[in-house]
């Protein structure tokens, strides 16, 4: 995030990418958080620290601050802004969407312009049985961009400050209150073309199998690190024109 140039460059890392988890050896990157919690049970910040250390170790990206949100917090955020609007490119039919009681249900979303409340937006961002984790990450980008667009419609920093206060329990973050306000102020005026979101995709990564038989993504971590560096420097053509 460049406050002076008012640009935001981001990259999504596949959750199944095999990396070196410091002190634990090879593993899926999404396992780093849980390993941190195991070392310090009940301390969610320990999970954040392990994820931070894993990203820094493998890709050389220094993490200055973090924002972490769980499923309930995500729904609260979407509902607090009055829902979001997304043009769904293809119909979604997931016959095995997970439920809170560890069962499944059928989740459907028609193609076309859809207004989503928090529950629907969460399911849209999580579903992947119909296609793959790659398409799911693209849907997650659409949700984030739709949230930014909805927030910009507030037009007032006072309303943004009220929203931050109301949602203080929905997320964990290392940003101080005044820093959150500064970010909110930037979000109101940043141009959509200055928000770039990149993905790590083939041929940088390829499907593979871990030693325990688990499905993973593998790739040259040095090459991936170089790509991440370019993406965060704004040198990669990211997605700046979503179907919103």
Image (cartoon, helix red, strand yellow):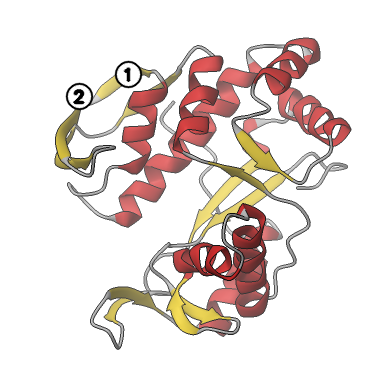
Q: Are marks 2 and 1 in contact (CB under 8 Å)?
A: yes
Residue found at x 75% / y 47%: 1
Left or right for 30, reference 91: right
Q: Residues within 10 Å of mark 2 (few under 14, many from 20)?
A: few
Left or right for 5, reference 41: right
Q: Nearer the viewer, residue 130 or 172?
A: 172
Q: Nearer the viewer, residue 184 or 162?
A: 162
Q: Nearer the viewer, residue 48 or 116?
A: 48
Image quarter where the C terminus lies is top left
Compared with 189, 198 (above or below) is below
Q: Which mark is residue 110?
A: 2
Q: Residues within 10 Å of mark 1 (few under 14, many from 20)?
A: some
Residue 221 horizontal/vertical position (percent): 53, 82
Residue found at x 59% / y 30%: 170
Residue 235 horizontal/vertical position (percent): 65, 60
Compared with 184, 56 (above or below) is below
Residue 187 horizontal/vertical position (percent): 72, 29
Residue found at x 80% / y 25%: 185
Residue 171 horizontal/vertical position (percent): 62, 36
Residue found at x 57% / y 61%: 41
Q: Nearer the viewer, residue 5 or 52?
A: 52
- Image quadrant where residue 161 sits: top right
Tell me the distance, in whole angstroms, between the alpha carbons under discs 2 and 1: 8 Å
Report which residue position mark 1 lands on.
Answer: 114
Q: Secondary structure at mark 2?
A: loop
């Amino acid at each position: 995030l460049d406050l002076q140039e008012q640009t935001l460059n981001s990259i999504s890392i596949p959750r199944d990418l095999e990396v070196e988890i410091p002190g634990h050896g090879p593993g899926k990157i999404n396992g780093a958080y849980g390993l941190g919690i195991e070392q310090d049970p009940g301390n969610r910040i320990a999970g954040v620290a392990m994820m931070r250390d894993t990203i820094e170790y493998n890709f050389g990206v220094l993490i200055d601050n973090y924002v972490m949100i769980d499923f309930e917090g995500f729904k609260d955020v979407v509902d607090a802004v009055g829902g979001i609007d997304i043009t769904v490119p293809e119909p979604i039919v997931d016959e095995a969407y997970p439920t809170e009681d560890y069962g499944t249900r059928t989740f459907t979303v028609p193609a076309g312009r859809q207004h989503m409340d928090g529950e629907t937006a969460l399911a849209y961002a999580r579903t992947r049985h119909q296609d793959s984790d790659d398409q799911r990450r693209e849907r997650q980008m659409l949700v984030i961009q739709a949230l930014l667009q909805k927030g910009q419609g507030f037009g007032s920093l006072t309303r943004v400050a009220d929203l931050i206060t109301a949602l203080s329990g929905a997320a964990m973050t290392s940003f101080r209150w005044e820093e959150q306000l500064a970010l909110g102020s930037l979000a109101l005026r940043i141009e959509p073309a200055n928000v770039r979101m990149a993905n790590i995709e083939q041929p940088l990564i390829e499907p593979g199998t871990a030693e325990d038989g688990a499905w993973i993504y593998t790739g040259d971590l040095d090459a991936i690190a170089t790509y991440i560096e370019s993406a965060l420097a704004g040198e990669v053509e990211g997605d700046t024109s979503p179907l919103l």
